[in-house]
Image: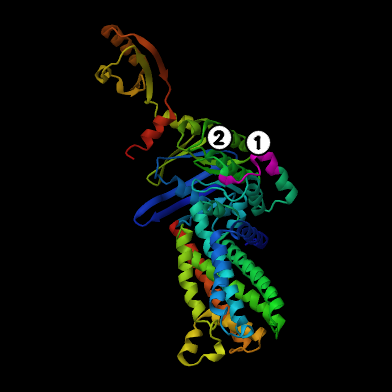
Amino acid sequence: MDWHLFIQSIVVTTEKNMRIYYFKGPVVVFGLLFPLIMFLTFFIGRDLDLVLFFPGFLAMMLFFTASSVGPLITPWEKREKTYERLLTLPVILESIVIGDILAGAIFGIAISILVFVVCTMVLAIPVTNSLLLLLAFVLGAVTFAALGTLLASPTADNPSNIMMLSSLVRLPLMFISGIFIPLSQLSGWFFMFTSLSPLTYLVDLFHASLNGDAVYPPWVDILVLLLVTLVFVWLAKIIQRWNLVKGI
Amino acid sequence: MDAIEATRLKKKFGTCTAVDDVSITVPEGSIFGFLGPNGAGKTTTIRMLTGVLIPDAGTVRIFGMDVARDPLTAKMKMGVIPENGTVYSDLSARQNILLTAKFFGMGRITREERADEILERLGLSDRRDDLVRTFSKGMRQRISIACAIIHAPPLLILDEPTTGLDVYSRRLVIETVRHMNREGSTVLLTTHNIEEANALCSVISVINHGKIVATESPENLKKTFDTSRYVEIAFNQPVEPSYFSASGIMRAESWGDKWRVYTDDPDRAVKYLATLAEREHLMIVSIATSNPTLEEAFVKLTAGT
């Protein structure tokens, strides 16, 4: 393997995705407007402690932005018939998967940090551990960008079908991850249930880095997010390779 | 060294065997034609050669490099125009070419100079900054070609590059293929246009039902079917097909306002037709004999499709 060519193929694939897909309608709607609307729906007009709920909101923002680009890229390229041309260029499956994930992750990090900066101007948001906060942004973005790429992997040349599938997966996760009810206030079977969602660990990591009121030790959150990322990437690669074998 | 060395390629889709034990060797510097009827396995073979599709069995080497083992290095040597692939409609003509050049690791100055040169050569300089979505099919295909040749590839693979194009775009494609070959690129192209293959290619492989049925130079292929000569004749009035039932005449086909009379002995056929015209009081408007054609060879090789 020529590593120089491999890295070059990842960088150019990422650049291509950023240039073409960041401003597509579904990305703007599902990545930007949707989490903002969810925030307004649940928090505005209710007597809630916004600082207490801010880590959950930030995690939700990062979750939706990072996972909104990936589901669009491959189905869009298959529909537009640019995917086959891409495969003939000096890229391999791994470059495409990693390039798609990086495009989603950069989008998620950029938008979420912007939201964070704006919110710190309005609210007195504490930052307990800034390094851990940075790690949470990066790790959360990569994990959920990988989820977005995984969701795009099944055979489909219709982006709206994949966006629907991604909503079916993402919306339930939002409700079982301690965003609307802090994890520290959950107990029993419901707490056990939340532990099944990878988003829970990002919410908890933001709690650890901002308010300092995490439920799990940070290393557990980091380890779970890393493992989940590896599983998402592995599954995306397996499915996309299967598509190449089947010619679809 | 051969530009392409594909050995015993196989591909099945469900119960259908699309490509069955296909081996191809494309010598460096040649223009190699790959012909076959629809569904014969041309595009599936091309997709395996270019790394788009993973074969069930067999190997592909591009200038000695195994596409499965070292796909990045092998693909660096190729420029491909896929049949089912197009360029990004959300980017301009120039942006598409520059993006492709980046995949091939070309430096900024080199890729910009070369992109402008190719856009000029393909007659698209005045539309270079327009989004491709506003382009006609012929113009998109020219951008596709520009992307394929931006890095002056040692191997150019074109899958049905002229299908559905207007005359001007078709000529540009053919001229570009010739130009690239003169510059040292080996060319592999699939086409439905047999005369195009005849005019361009030094070697032709014919595939049918997923198997290679012949690999020869166009002239050798024609010689193989030397019995397929014909006399083309037009009379001043319509005639019955039964007029052409005579010994030495294999069959006759209506060809516009003319008839093509296939024969293995043109001299005898011409004499018969002259006698026929005399006997039936017909006036011969035009008459011409033809050498065996590649089309006839193709039809015979793929008979029963």
Establish if B123 lies above or below A8.
above
Colour scheme in use: rainbow
On whether residue B124 falls in the magenta region, the answer is: yes
Residue B265 rendering spot, x and y as whole percentages: 35, 19
Q: Residues within 10 Å of mark 2 (few under 14, many from 20)?
A: many
Residue A248 rendering spot, x and y as whole percentages: 45, 57
Q: Is residue A94 left or right of residue A121?
A: left
Which residue is more in the foreground, A74 or B17? Answer: A74
Subunit that carries the residue with mark 2: B
Start and end of the magenta stretch?
Answer: B114-133
Establish if B140 lies above or below B268.
below
Q: Is residue B79 left or right of residue B288?
A: right
- Mark 1 or mark 2, which has the lower sequence index? 1
- Residue identifier under label 2: B169
On whether residue A114 falls in the magenta region, the answer is: no
Label 1 – label 2 distance at C-alpha: 12 Å
Identity, as a three-letter code, of the amino acid under mark 2:
Ser
Q: Which mark is residue B121?
A: 1
Element class at badge 2 = helix
Identity, as a three-letter code, of the amino acid under mark 1:
Arg
Residue B138 rendering spot, x and y as whole percentages: 54, 38
Residue B108 rendering spot, x and y as whole percentages: 73, 51
